[in-house]
Amino acid sequence: MTIRLQAGILGTALLFGVGIRVSPAQEPGAGSSISESESARPKSSSPAGATPEINQAAETSEETRKGFRGRFLIDQKEMWTSPAKIRLADAGWILPLAGLSATLFATDASFSKSQSNAPATIQHYKTISTAGVGVLAGAAAGMWVLSYRSQNEHWRETGFLAGESGLDSLLMAEALKYSLRRQRPLQGDGSGPFFQSGGTSFPSEHAAAAWSIAGVIAHEYPGPLTKMAAYGLATLVSFSRVRASQHFPSDVLIGSLAGYMISENIYSRRAGSEPHGADWPSFSETFRTSEDTPIKSMGSPYVPLDSWVYPAIERLEALGYIHTAFEGAKPWARTECARLISEANDEANDELSQVSAGDSAVADEQAQALLAALSKEFHREAELQTGDANRSAALPSAYMRVTTASGAVLTDGYHFGQTYAYDYGRPFRRGTTFISGFSTDFTSGRVFLHLSGEFQHAPSAPALSDAVREAIAESDEVPISPAEPFDAINRVAMMDSYLGFNLDDWQISFGKQSLSWGPGPGGSLILSDNADPFYMVRIAQAQPMELPSFLGLLGPVRLETFMGREKGHPISGHPFIYGQKISVKPFRSLEFAYGRTTTIAGIGDPLNTRTLFESFFGRVDSKERSVPGDSHTSVDWTWHVPHLRDRFVFYGELESDDDPIPFQNLTRAVLRPGIYLVRLPFLNKWDFHAEWTSSECPGQRDAHGHLNYWNWSYRDGYTNNGNLVGNTVGREGKTIQAWTRYWISPHQTMEFTAKNSEVDTDFIPGGGRWQDYRATHELALRSGVFFRSFLQFERIGHFPLLFSGVRNNATASLEIGFAPGRVH
């Protein structure tokens, strides 16, 4: 009921009363500018004893009052009839804004409760927000008043339009506030319910007024400094209303959006064919789909991390057909994959031309097969290069999977290990687990949407023994948990599901998403798909860019950043997590990247300007004597060894907890080196990966598990819903593993895996050792039907805390699905 109510309110707020301007046509009879009304007014004689200047001011004032009444009525008509002007093309900006608003609605209460509500803090930010609006309003009013002395018509127009916009935004905000009656963060239980007596939280009138005035000033005087000052001050007002616990984030978003759009409407409808300031296109005009829109600005869903596409492109890159892929930063947009396939096709055509010229080069048959399959997969994105409109839909893909484990299994990678890992945090226990799900995506111009959901079942499990619960409590520095059995799981879960839009090659997406920030199949140390996708706002380049001037020596560059929230942290209070990654390719053969994530805003560590600033720049807090939050940094590389480019690749990752750069303190860093043999001798259809990973820091052998993936302030660890966000080597563990894959065809492969894992006795009493051996088969038919299966044998040779003696288990899995492809 609450979700439906908030969804309805969200729709009302976005479509009703925000002054949407859906076409550039002027409203008939819209008021004229002050300068035009003055030039058109009839001349009159001056009253006796009055100077011409006084008579002119009085006449202008009277004309202004008459004009304002007409403009005010038109403004109200524009605002309150705006829903009738909504068109399907407006989905390009309405859907992303709705996605962001819905995300804020879902997190409003928890975000506000994580803040400091000290009276001094509240009063401090209330003063800032009030002063910010006062400065903007005072600047506009001052320009209007002084314009009569200086006869500066531009000042007069700016002040008048800003005042008109501010008044309209305040009336709109007040009307919605007293209609929707949402409680403020400090009212009631802090959940912000609507239609409550005394509720006046939604939307924020301070934010609406600030953005409505700032918008007019920034476009009347469109210089960069003016825009930075106006919009910067409006942003400060919006932020301060949240920090003062006067409004929820969604209140401020809708208020800011309403003020901005009202000012755009008023500014754009003013009379005069030659405006003083800059043009101001509406959201509809900005997001309108056009055949002239470059492909880098078209919205594109991301390819799932478990797709066959990534190993296929990795193989093409290793064979020398692709030079600008970034292996350590996934997922990739579909348009980016299409660009890489185009690059590979060009390289293959060059080889064919060499053959026709009598050169000894011979096009690789396996590469040609991979190219053909990938070209078919991304044919729709390739057609965008020819000017096709970006409108398409993927027919829903449906699948179901049954997995059975016959013996004792490991399910806690944070403390012990995982029998089955890198599966998006899906439940796995001894017995039979079952999932049934779907996925689908849509694109329209700059907008893209991806949805996936599942029904998940896992059997019940007995309670942990006293010894295990005591060991966990000691290692995590937390109270001992009660001896309760684990109930059977039967739930519907959303997996990767997000809404986004492309803003000139920057894809901005909101929702549940998974990231992988390291090369190789073994699982990134800093971010992987081992845990449940978490809610985030992600900003990433759809395609790499070239830096100007001497910075071009870095080669292609790819940037991305995100801000999300971890779940399943009852001890540390469900903290936020944000991250940044920059990847460069100074040479065709070398990719190098730096990534960083920061967990922040748990219990006792509020999210505010100071903590964000200090955590981002690594500044030590004077009171706590440490950098706020729990930071993880990594560098990773992929090196296609020269002269062995189509044979040997050396890749790896170095990760550190708390150090700004992993190289800074190698005795604390975690290392994951790997090699990739593209073709085995005499077995050209086979490839081979091998990796070694250790979280036992050379200089910290007595850490007792209190270093990597653990923090004194965040004792639930680097996890989301209980699963490690990084590599399942865990805390004080070692892993060596190898994969060999037989490429029967691009859509049919067999893979064999061997893995040896250990947990140190310094962390877990008695330590642990076990081995896994797996055979995997994947097959996709032309009809769209696909099969995935694996058979795994695990031997737990030594784990005295968990089991007495040696334990063996066999796990078998079969997945059947149907993915007919994309239509348009």
Image: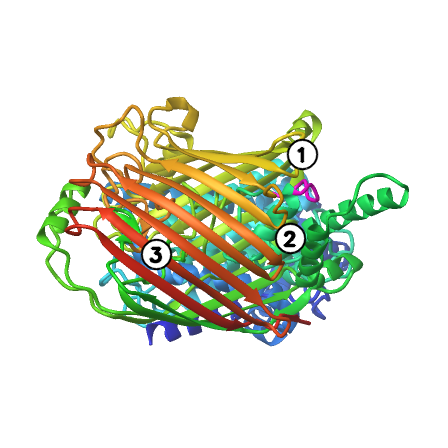
Residue type indicated by callout 1? Arg
Q: Name the residue under label 2.
A: 337
Residue depicted at x 20% and y 65%: 461
Find numbered disc 3 in the image and state the secondary structure of the residue it sits on.
strand
What segment is highlighted magenta in the picture? 319-325
Residue type indicated by callout 3? Phe
* Quadrant the N terminus occupies: bottom left
Decide which of 293, 301 is in the foreground and name it. 301
Marks 1,3: beta carbons within 8 A: no
**Residue 452 position within the rendered picture, expressed as x and y whole percent measured from the top left:** 47, 67
- How would you classify the magenta stretch by its main secondary structure? loop
- The residues bearing labels 2 and 3 have C-alpha atoms spaced at a distance of 35 Å
Instruction: Answer with the quarter of the image where residue 585 lies.
Output: top right
**Residue 187 position within the rendered picture, expressed as x and y whole percent measured from the top left:** 25, 60
**Residue 791 position within the rendered picture, expressed as x and y whole percent measured from the top left:** 40, 61
- Which mark, by number, is residue 793? 3
Q: Name the residue under label 1.
A: 588
Residue depicted at x 69% and y 69%: 27
* Quadrant the C terminus occupies: bottom right
